[in-house]
Amino acid sequence: MERKGFNSTFGMIMAAVGSAVGLGNIWRFPYIVGTNGGGAFLLIYIIFSFIIGVPLLMTEMLIGRKAKSDAVDSFKKLAPKKKWYVSGGLGALAAFLILSFYGVVAGWSLDYVFKAATNQFAGKSAAEIEALFTNFITAPIRPIICTFIFLAITMIIVKAGVERGIEKVSKVLIPLLLIIVFLLGVRGIFLDNGVEGLKFLFIPDFSKLTMPGVLAALGHSFFSLSLGMAIMITYGSYVKEDENIASSAFKIAIFDLLVAVFAGVAIFTAVFSFGLEPGQGAGLVFVTLPNVFPVMPGGYLFGVAFFVLLSLAALTSTISLLETSVAFGVDSLKMSRNKASWLSAVLIFLIAIFCSLSNGSAFPFKFFGKSLFDFLDHITANYMIVLAALIEVIFIGWGYRKTEVFNELTNNGKLKFNLKNAYYIAVKYIIPIAMILILLSSFGILKSA
């Protein structure tokens, strides 16, 4: 029986772009660019995106399409009676855990749409705006309600299925998201002194680039494309046999990069226009920018549009993260989509409650000195998805038949694939080395001088 999947190339690309274009682009990307020197970091990130991210994206998509199943079952089908499925299991578990704290941040973005729409930033000092954020995320009830609403919306979309839910919604949300981020970027360019933000973002100053910055660019190059999380294997399983995997991977990477860059333009032009510090870290979006909106021309609309953008980006990613768990329930555990959707959403929400509470005093327990929220963020981003990616490229590069790989990439010889040698060099050597470097850095073995 044919596996139900994406109905069109456009829908497939929009869904995959939706997964890639998440909070990582709007929330995480600007602050790691800001803390790592701007233009030089961006250049290194772009290079890594195409020599690491794209080949890894192609690898995950071909694994999924070849096996036509979830991440765990895909490896079991391609390599029966072997343990390569550990990669799929790690990735699927990582996606499950990531959604439990990512959903909390998504809930924050939803609350900030309300705050921006009701003009709650107006007339407040920088200290008051910081306190507004701190008091909100440490509160015991409101963030959990926001998380519940966000996860409920996500579950409704995923439960509707790939074509009628994920693809249908992605076709609307992603073009809307692209329009908003483009308009915000253009608006920022015309702010007074906004050109300084453009210089910071696009003119490389390699004296500001450190080894930790290079490793951060390397890690973000595959984190931002939702790699190592079993997502793209799952989405790959829904891709039609006549789709061009290589072409789709390049398009997804380009869209992902464009959103990240335009988000950077929108944020850094505003930051430099009002004399703020670009290296503010994770608070850049929720603490620094709300200082800007009330005092900039058209700032009310700018602020509302920005947090709507943040929420849309979050939703497109929470959909893909939940779908990974649902696909595991359907394919590996033989559940109905309805049951797998409900069960996954409920379990994730239960963990999300404790993640949210761990930001305040209501859940004071520490895990290796970290709150539950920070601990799950740390182990998934630094260990689980990296190890999952490492295992899968070793499998494709060294443990699977080369002819089968290229048959999948060329649709059994119907398509040309001129980068065959470059792809195999990346998968067999470059990506494994990159993943090992990230792991060594995460374990504290590799440190800069």
Image (spheres, rainbow, N blue to C red):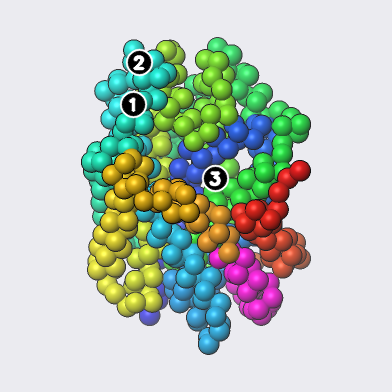
Mark 2 lies on a secondary structure that is: loop
Mark 3 lies on a secondary structure that is: helix
Kindly identify the residue that appears in the image at 40 percent across and 73 percent down: 3
Which is more N-terminal, label 2 or label 1?
2
* Foreground residue among 24 and 185: 24
Badges 1 and 2: C-beta atoms under 8 Å apart? yes
* Residue 262 in view: no
* Label 2 sits on residue: 124
The quadrant of the picture occupied by the N terminus is bottom left
Q: Is residue 380 left or right of residue 348?
A: right
Q: Is residue 361 left or right of residue 434?
A: left
Going by the numbered disc 1, the residue's amino acid type is Leu
Q: Is residue 398 left or right of residue 247?
A: right
Mark 1 lies on a secondary structure that is: helix
Q: Considering only vertical position in the picture, is 343 above or below 307? A: below
Quarter-of-image position of residue 296:
top left
Q: Which residues are magenta?
A: 388-413
- Number of the label disc, if any, that sits on residue 256: 3
* Label 1 sits on residue: 132
Residues under labels 2 and 3: Cα distance? 34 Å
Kindly identify the residue that appears in the image at 66 percent across and 31 percent down: 37
Q: Considering only vertical position in the picture, is 240 above or below 21? A: below
Quarter-of-image position of residue 197:
top right
Going by the numbered disc 2, the residue's amino acid type is Lys
Badges 3 and 1: C-beta atoms under 8 Å apart? no
Going by the numbered disc 3, the residue's amino acid type is Asp
